[in-house]
Image (cartoon, rainbow, N blue to C red):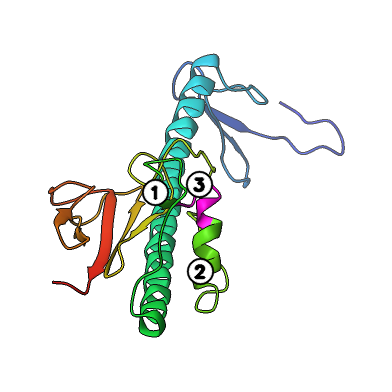
Amino acid sequence: MQSKKGFAPHHFLTQQLNKNDYILKDNGLNPVKSFGRKSGAGFTLIELIVVIAIIAVLSAIVLVNVNGYTAKARDARRRADITQIQKALEMYYADNSRYPNAGGATSPNGGWSNSADASWNSLQNLIRPYLAKLPVDPIENYDAAKWAVNGYHYSYVGCTQTYMLVFNLEVAGGPDPGAWHCGTRFYQYGGTGANTKVKTYGFSKLN
């Protein structure tokens, strides 16, 4: 065919791959592939559902891991708080030859001091020279009806030559060491299992 003046003839080779896929070759140009989805077409409903489901699963996994790390961090704080209180109690004993009295808690009974109510302030006043601020549980909600065994609180009871501190972890780890109360009875409020949440710490000068 004779070309019009000023125009060079072009030859195209079209190879059909399948119903929707083509390769076009234009003299010296790079091959261009047109895929099955039409240009500018959006995702199908099924594809969107699959993507959303995958995102939801990944988000749940991340959330569980973050919550786990956060709970472990709070538990580390609890252990550090109890160690700090124990040091203050020993300094009090060194000066007074006895541990400070407890009392006034709503739960478990009036013989205890509990971080959930005003009895903790009374204990604070006794050991203030040794500990400026008596710590409370990282998620203390001041529910006076509960104590360390059934809530996230710190609970203390003293008996002149002995004391007990009870606290509650979010992640069970290790056995409850237990403690003697008044030298007459051994308590393990967390039970005797290999891994417990509730911990009973204390010391006795009688044993």
Instruction: Give residue 81's position: percent from left, percent from top.
Output: 43, 66
> Would you place residue 119 above or below residue 58 in this image?
below
Instruction: Give residue 99's position: percent from left, percent from top.
Output: 36, 70
Judge the density around disc 2: few (<14), some (14-19), many (≥20) Cα neighbours within 10 Å.
some
**Magenta stretch in the rendered image:** 114-120
Q: Which mark is residue 116?
A: 3
Q: Which residue is mark 2?
A: 126
The reply, left or right, for residue 206 in relation to residue 45 is left
Q: Which residue is mark 1?
A: 68
Front residue (pair 170, 46): 170
Looking at marks 3 and 1 on the same chain, the residue that comes earlier in the sequence is marked by 1
Looking at marks 2 and 3 on the same chain, the residue that comes earlier in the sequence is marked by 3
**Residue at position x 41%, y 41% from top?**
107
Specify the quadrant of the image occupied by residue 129.
bottom right
Whether residue 134 can be seen here: no
Whether residue 102 can be seen here: yes
Q: Which mark is residue 10?
A: none
